[in-house]
């Protein structure tokens, strides 16, 4: 696949090198010629000097045959404009933009442009490393309002219903991984031993939810 990357900072260069190692054809755009030094002498892709939302520059980078486009420059506006041009003008289906402003990220997600909101993503990575296994979030929405967590369940929850678990924790069970396969439960579904239960929770309530899940279920 041909991939076009706008921005040759540390993220853009790292992404370009990783994609090339995987066998993809890569073109990198940056307005600063010196930025391409980050790619090193072993990079064999295209290096295009210019602004990433300029149609002429995008065409020079091969956007018309691209299967994917990533906008990872240091500017939110440049990233989102170039992502929209790639999607709407050139019809690239796989488009993603890095956004520093989480509120903006939520807006662009609703417009159909997948984003990586840097602050919530970084926060989540730290949580994964700092918190005990099973407590860190598996996913967080771009605004940081909702998180999906794997609930560390007390063994006595086996045989109880999803409805009971949701009532006790205040969370919404999103899916269950059972014997390696994903399951979409309803409120009447019964939990089984060794289930991996993932639930959607409001940010700021993760500690309360997991505390309730770790405790034995309330008596009926």
Image: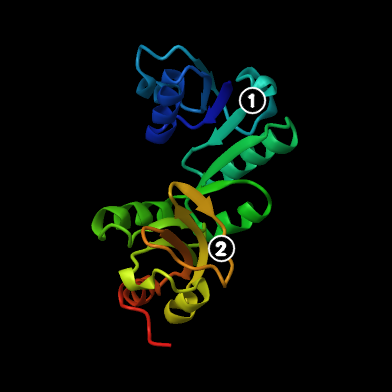
Please name the residue that numbered disc 1 is placed on. Answer: 58
Q: How far apart are marks 1 and 2 (CA)?
A: 45 Å
Q: Quadrant of residue 196?
A: bottom left
The structure residue drawn at horizontal position 43% and vertical position 71%, both measured from the top left corner, is: 159
As drawn, the label of residue 185 is 2
The structure residue drawn at horizontal position 60% and vertical position 44%, both measured from the top left corner, is: 80
Q: Where is residue 5 in the image (x, y as percent from the top left)?
A: 53, 29
Categorize mark 2 by other alpha carbons within 10 Å: few (<14), some (14-19), many (20+).
Answer: some
Q: What element carries label 2?
A: loop
Q: In which quarter of the image is residue 52?
A: top right
Tell which circle, 1 or 2, labels the residue nearer the N-terminal end. Answer: 1
Q: Where is residue 88 in the image (x, y as percent from the top left)?
A: 74, 38
User: Does the rendering let one see residue 111?
Assistant: yes
Categorize mark 1 by other alpha carbons within 10 Å: few (<14), some (14-19), many (20+).
Answer: many
Residue lying at the far bottom of the rendered structure = 220
Q: Where is residue 23 in the image (x, y as percent from the top left)?
A: 48, 17
Above or below 152: residue 95: above
Q: Position of residue 139 (x, y in %)?
A: 46, 55
- Where does the N terminus fall, quadrant-wise? top right
Above or below 161: residue 28: above
As drawn, the label of residue 218 is none
The structure residue drawn at horizontal position 38% and vertical position 87%, both measured from the top left corner, is: 219
Between residue 84 and residue 74, name the one nearer to us. Answer: 84
């Amino acid at each position: 696949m041909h991939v076009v990357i706008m921005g040759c900072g540390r993220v853009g260069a790292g992404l370009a090198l990783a994609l090339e190692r995987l066998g993809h054809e890569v073109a990198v755009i940056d307005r600063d010629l010196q930025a391409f030094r980050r790619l090193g002498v072993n990079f064999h892709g295209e290096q295009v000097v210019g602004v990433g939302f300029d149609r002429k520059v995008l065409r020079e980078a091969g956007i018309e045959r691209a299967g994917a486009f990533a906008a990872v420059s240091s500017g939110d506006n440049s990233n989102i404009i170039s992502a929209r041009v790639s999607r709407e003008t050139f019809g690239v289906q796989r488009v993603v933009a890095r956004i520093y402003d989480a509120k903006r990220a939520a807006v662009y997600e609703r417009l159909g442009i997948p984003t990586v909101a840097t602050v919530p993503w970084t926060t989540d990575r730290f949580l994964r490393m700092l918190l005990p296994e099973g407590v860190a979030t598996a996913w967080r929405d771009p605004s940081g309002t909702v998180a999906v967590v794997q609930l560390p369940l007390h063994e006595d929850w086996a045989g109880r219903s999803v409805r009971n678990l949701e009532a006790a924790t205040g969370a919404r069970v999103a899916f269950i991984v059972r014997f390696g396969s994903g399951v979409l439960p309803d409120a009447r579904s019964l939990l089984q031993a060794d289930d991996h239960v993932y639930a959607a929770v409001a940010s700021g309530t993760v500690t309360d939810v997991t505390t309730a899940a770790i405790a034995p279920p309330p008596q009926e």
